[in-house]
Amino acid sequence: MSITLHVNGRAALVAADPTTPLLDVLRNTLDLKGSRYGCGLEQCGSCMVLVDGEPVYACSREVGTVAGKRIETVESLADHPLRQAFLDEQAGQCGYCLSGILISAKALLDRTPRPTRAQIVAALDKHLCRCGTQSRIIRAVERAGAHMAEGASR
Amino acid sequence: MSATTLPLSFTTNPSPARWLRFDPDRTVHVAVGKVEIGQGIVTALAQIAAEELDVTLDAIRILSGDTDAAPDEGSTTSSLSIEVGGTSLRLIAAEVRARMLDRLAQRLNCAPGDITVTDGAFFRGTEPTGQDYWSLAPEVDLARAADGGATPKPVAAYRIVGQSVPRRDLPAKLGAGAFIHDMVRPDLLHARILRQPSRGARLAALDEAAIRRAAGGEIRIVRRGNFVAFLSADETIAQRAGAAAPAHARWENLRALTPAQQEAAWLIGQPADDRVIGDPLPAAAGEVVEARYSRPYIAHASIAPSCALAESRGGHLSVWSHTQGVYPLRNGLAKVLARPVETISVHHAQGAGCYGHNGADDAALDAALIAQEVPDHCIRVQWRREEEFGYEPLGSAMAITLRAVVNAEGLPIDWTAEVWSGSHVQRPAMGGNMLAHEALEVPAPDPRPTDPTEAAGGGGTRNAIPHYEIPARRVLHHLVPGAPVRTSALRGLGAVANVFALEGFMDELAARAGADPVAYRLSLLANRPRAAAVIARAGAMAGWAGRGPGGSGRGLGIGFAQYKNRSAYAAVVAEVEVDQEVRLKRVWCAADAGLVVNPDGARNQLEGGILQAASFALKEQITFDATGVSSVDWASYPILRFTEVPEIACELIEAKEERSLGVGECTLGPTAAAIGNAVAHALGARIRDMPLTRERIAAVLLGG
Ligand code: FES
Ligand code: FES
């Protein structure tokens, strides 16, 4: 079956069984490897993508349900202030959890430009980081928020 | 450096050509055997090479972990990558620089000492010589073995080592393609495995038709004895087959586990290899204080499931793995597959953080076995989450009884730690098996569980001997070979539980003596200034002097250790609030790791160790039922979450003139202990078993 997906601002026609996990289509059909598999169980957040601006678990979301919707993956964040903020804070150890976390952070900043620490941890609580990089990640999101607010007020 | 003190990586690979090459694009190709496992080693090694050669950091290109193209440095373990790998690379680079300067001095008819190096170019005084490493390289023999005689730069002259530099691998990890999981090669087939539930189990029946139906597309089934793999060019189909398979397999000769076996106490009284380490018995006479502590089985719980790629083409087997050691893995594969090592190449590719011996090597054997059966394809094996939790080697449970003889001042004069534990290292090279080997037609012999030697820092005994000045100290070690699950190296090995126990017991002894915990510790460290310094510093950072009385629901606790009693020093103070459960509010840490190559990278490791240990201390326990490990997902094996993360402050104490000490593991024991002590302070009663759960808090509160 053919399904039209709108990923990172581009339309793509993919042939896939509509029950295929969105994550598999992104990674293997569209070669967007930034979204990662961690559990397939909606428990770790490694696979997080935005669908119409909302964070969703791509590991369990069936591709047939997102036809025509706006999908954003970490590949779309190459120029986002979050990226530089994560580099500035050196917020990463193994880094496997980061692409999903960037996605939830983006959704948070879209809605709440200068989030508090409490808002950040609440927004990221779906995400696990086994390396224990959380405090740096929190700082990086704070930094990106501050940077964006500065940019907006200029 | 005398030959006897040369590091192993150097003596095994004394030819500089094995390590360094000057490429035409004015870069330096540096090949190393230590690998990136999220700890930032590649960045730190690049700093060391750039420093010693006096080239820019950007000129260094690192290749790490490759049996075709990088030196054999064994495994990346025990916080030794900087201590051994870094020291070796420094000596090699110093040798290369010296040979280059010798050659140029000959040409210019001057002394090597007259030549200086800036950004890889050679100057005589301030005059450019027109020569650099790259122009001179063709004339200099780098293959000839080095003897370690070249003198590295003095520390005072360092300008790159000791600076915080950004991690080289991080940019890629904020995007796509950084991990082994993302590799794509020609003729790729995805594979999932049906795991043998326990050693010796026989696959009596497999409903292949039902599995094919569940897969929803064409699959190929590869079977070797009790090892079964499902292959498809479509990952979704392979995954569906793998997920469905356990329900359609009937096994015989299963070994059931019981919930009682998941507790550390089960180990006590099991047949064991017993040893006494340290000062001989009998213990000194006097008043005896005793307490028992424990930690359960815990998981590495890497955030990514294990993955490997393998392909057999033209009789050569190429394997990609996130293993900690490409050479040991190649040896292991050669043994199981009964083929010469020369016919196998192992290339390291990055996985998620592993924190020790997880499923990486097992997945590599899975892929290699399938590749042998299905040549001319690239076989990509990825474990399922349930498989990762259910079959990775676990960190052993430990029960620890501490016995101190105290003098009239309440200070210990004799200390015995009695430790019951499974093995802490069952790597394939050390008596362990790779999982699929046990499922083959001719299965692997039973593993021979051992433990690292004391010279290597011990396993179950790691940090069981207190660093404190106590006249007699010993360990009675009971290594239980019949632990109910496969156990192996997990970050810190026995040190996490041993430090949790010994530092908890120190607080108990201090309380008995009516002393402040920090002052009590310092009184036992009069001749150990580096230890005393980190404790005093962490105390000052945390405002220890203002610590209130116990039992208020708010607690401040300290923990200290010198990792392996010979590596980095770390003291950690934790602040908690406890009602029904523990809320970890703040953590302060002071560490002394000698010369620190990349301070920000080191702090990142200290912080990571703190949060992982907090997770161990507060939340983690593997559970068993008749089918085996029953905590097979993140719901049944919860770890620390964002909303539970404390504020952290870490300081490195300047010790540039001291040798570099690894920092990956030094904060874990002290953090677990600090939390245990803070909870005891908050409650006015002590929990001696990890994890410090809601149920255990309720039990002490009820027990009063
Ligand atoms: S992979 Fe989707 S939540 Fe873990
Ligand atoms: S950085 Fe490794 S899991 Fe988050």
Image: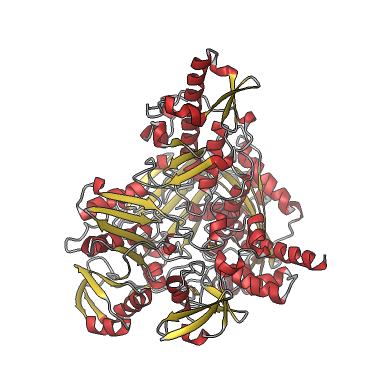
Residue visible at 67% across and 74% down in the picture: A108
Residue visible at 57% across and 50% down in the picture: B167
Give the percent coordinates (x, y) of residue B214: 31, 84
Residue visible at 35% across and 57% down in the picture: B361
Residue B17: image quadrant is top left
Give the percent coordinates (x, y) of residue B125: 64, 19
**Viewer-proximal residue among B111 and B639:** B111
Tell me: B672 left or right of B203. Answer: right
Tell me: B111 left or right of B362. Answer: right
**Viewer-proximal residue among A87 and B512:** A87
Give the percent coordinates (x, y) of residue B315: 21, 53
Residue visible at 53% across and 53% down in the picture: B169
Give the percent coordinates (x, y) of residue A39: 45, 72
Q: Is residue B286 visible?
A: no
**Viewer-proximal residue among B384 and A68:** A68
Ligand 2 - quadrant of the structure image: bottom right
Residue B428, compared with residue B7, is above or below; it is: below
